[in-house]
Amino acid sequence: MTPAQSKKNKADSTIFGTTPEGEKIVRHQISNGGTSISVLSWGATIQELRVMGESHSLLLGGRDVAAYLGSMQYFGAVVGPVANRIAGAEMEIGGIRHQLDQNEAGRTTLHSGVAGYSGRNWRFTNVTPTRCRLELHHPDGLGGIPGNINASVTYTIDTAGHLEIEMTGAADQPTYFNPAFHGYWNLSGSADLSDHRLMVPATSYLPVDDAQLPLGAPVQVAGGEFDYRQVRAIGPVLDHNFCLSQGGDQMVLACRLSTQRLQLDVLTDQPGVQLYNGAHIDTGADLGVDGGSYGPHAGLAIEPQFWPDTPHHPEYPDCLLLPEKPVRYRSRFELRRI
């Protein structure tokens, strides 16, 4: 840890580094029930998650700011205001077309492009030993996304050591709002996911084209390569949205990830979960929190969210944020020893 990272500020938090604009990036640690996380103001990022008795972080994360400005820009971050991909880098609201940032192959918008939450410095507004809340203001038109949007994310660790993530959003005009936590999980500390097993109770998923955009209606998983209803090894192709049964305000099981030692249950009130097997991870010279670099399949991204490219699919669950209707989304990550 560098001297800048170890320096304390008035709130007894750690200064992790500085943004490209020279703002301080603040780091807080919270813990409970044998679980601890380190949270950065940059991207509202969980840099690491550790549990008692394990020597490695269960979430992939970077050792320094350079990693988050480079190959690890989405690792453990909150992505939004609209997570995932938007076709043609455009969307229409109320008959008005909005041109967005074409930050993926010049064709699509990924994680909101230049407006993305993962590349913004959030503000800690409330911190206790077991909970921290961060807030961010999105100015109207940034990255082409309309509306002044006020967002928050709250990380809480309960007495059982489970992590709960709550996100809220409010806007002064209709706009799409679909933030997501983009954490890569590796429960064993191994180089890849070959010793992990996955179960997803969803009965349908969204097939995609070569730009990773959904083709249309959900397709049944039964008997196909994306049938994870029974515990199995993680396949070589996986970067898809699974369609969850919605329970209103109640959280439902999105997936279960396990090794011989640990089990992670992910519950959410969101209508979908994007699962990505990390096939293209390559952090090169950027080192992770435990000292090494990350390669292909180093972690499984588990992202509860609305379905991708919703602005172009009115038949999908609606993530349009209205001024008169602020929203709150919740997910919980429950870790247990087997």
Image (cartoon, helix red, strand yellow):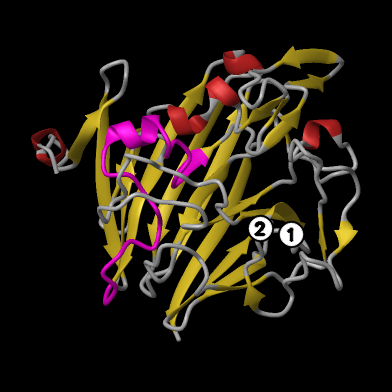
**Which of the 4 quarters of the picture holds residue 269?**
bottom right
Q: Is residue 23 magenta?
A: no
Q: Mark 2 belongs to which amino acid?
A: Asp
* Neighbours of disc 2 within 10 Å: few (<14), some (14-19), many (20+): many
Place of residue 224 in the rendered image (x, y in percent of width and height, measured from the top left): 83, 68
Residues at circles 2 and 1 in contact by the CB criterion of under 8 Å: yes
**Where the N terminus falls, by quadrant?**
top left
Q: Main secondary structure of the magenta part?
A: loop
Q: Can residue 96 be seen in this view?
A: yes
Q: Can residue 140 be seen in this view?
A: no
Q: Residue at x 65, y 39 (%)?
A: 84
Q: Which one is nearer the viewer's eye here, 328 or 285? A: 285
Residue tagged by mark 1? 248
Q: Is residue 58 magenta?
A: yes
Q: Mark 1 belongs to which amino acid?
A: Gly
Q: Nearer the viewer, mark 2 or mark 1?
A: 2
Q: Which one is nearer the viewer's eye here, 206 or 127? A: 206
In the image, residue 269 sits, relative to residue 136, either above or below, namely below
Place of residue 160 in the rendered image (x, y in percent of width and height, measured from the top left): 39, 75
Q: Which residue is drawn at 64% across and 33% down?
A: 82
* Neighbours of disc 1 within 10 Å: few (<14), some (14-19), many (20+): few
Magenta span covers which residues? 52-78
Residue tagged by mark 2? 269
